[in-house]
Image (cartoon, rainbow, N blue to C red):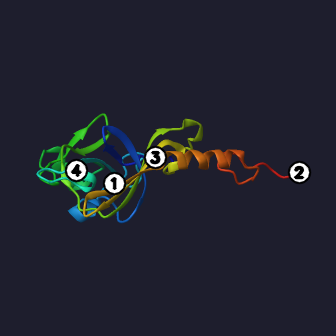
Amino acid sequence: MTAQISDKISYRDCEYGVVGWDGPALFDPAEYGLQPIMFSTGCWQGYYCAFEVAAERAAGPGEGGEPAEVLCLTTVFIGLTGEPREAAERGAGSALFGVRPRYSESDGCFVYQNIGAVLSYTGSLTLGADFIWDHYVHMGFHPPWKYRTVHELTFAAGRLVKAVDRSEEMARMRASAADSESPFSLFKPLEPRP
């Protein structure tokens, strides 16, 4: 299996991949009547999304006196087929939060752009940036320890309630595994025993 495209998220002026979560799916196209199809070997599920953590409009300060931050869906990249594809090609595709899809040659799929919908997500997201290419594997989704910068964000009804920097913890995990003599080390290929 090809390495898969992760959802993207913008958080405090930096771009991250969503590399883990604890809670429900962030976005399920089936809940909106969309049936995605694979459009690339890097996207077997047929869609991926972009999100942002943004200042809540017309809201008072959140915890610590800072402006409250909310989780927003900004873009959906999706593979369509059959009648939904034909309708989208005519500019009459199913609307998602009032936005109609357009085909993107550069992305190789249909794109719902500039959505800006606040989600009522409750759960935790793990974000990763600065991927360590020495740990690239050409399959599945990459886990958090393969990133230099890792944050865990916890949301309640779409509002950010806790943010923890996990970067040092991931660095310690990499160092511990790299120093290990275990044949099951995360970084050393298994070798036949003599």
- Mark 4 or mark 3: name the one nearer the start of the chain: 4
Is residue 75 in sight in this rendering?
no
Cα distance between the residues tagged 4 and 2? 57 Å
Q: Residues within 10 Å of mark 1 (few under 14, many from 20)?
A: some
Residue 172: image location, x then y, percent: 60, 47
Q: Secondary structure at mark 3?
A: strand
Cα distance between the residues tagged 2 and 1? 47 Å
Whether pointer 4 and pointer 3 mark residues with C-beta atoms closer than 8 Å, the reply is: no
- Mark 3 or mark 2: name the one nearer the start of the chain: 3
Cα distance between the residues tagged 4 and 3? 37 Å
Q: Which residue is mark 1?
A: 37
Residue type at numbered disc 4: Arg
- Mark 2 or mark 1: name the one nearer the start of the chain: 1
- Mark 1 or mark 4: name the one nearer the start of the chain: 1
In front here: 117 or 99? 117
Q: Height in image: 25 above or below 80?
A: below
Cα distance between the residues tagged 1 and 3? 30 Å
- Where residue 150 is drawn, which disc sits there? 3
Residue 95: image location, x then y, percent: 14, 53
Whether pointer 4 and pointer 2 mark residues with C-beta atoms closer than 8 Å, the reply is: no
Cα distance between the residues tagged 1 and 4? 10 Å
Nearest-to-viewer mark from 4 and 2: 2
Residue at 35% across, 53% down? 46
Q: Which residue is mark 4?
A: 85
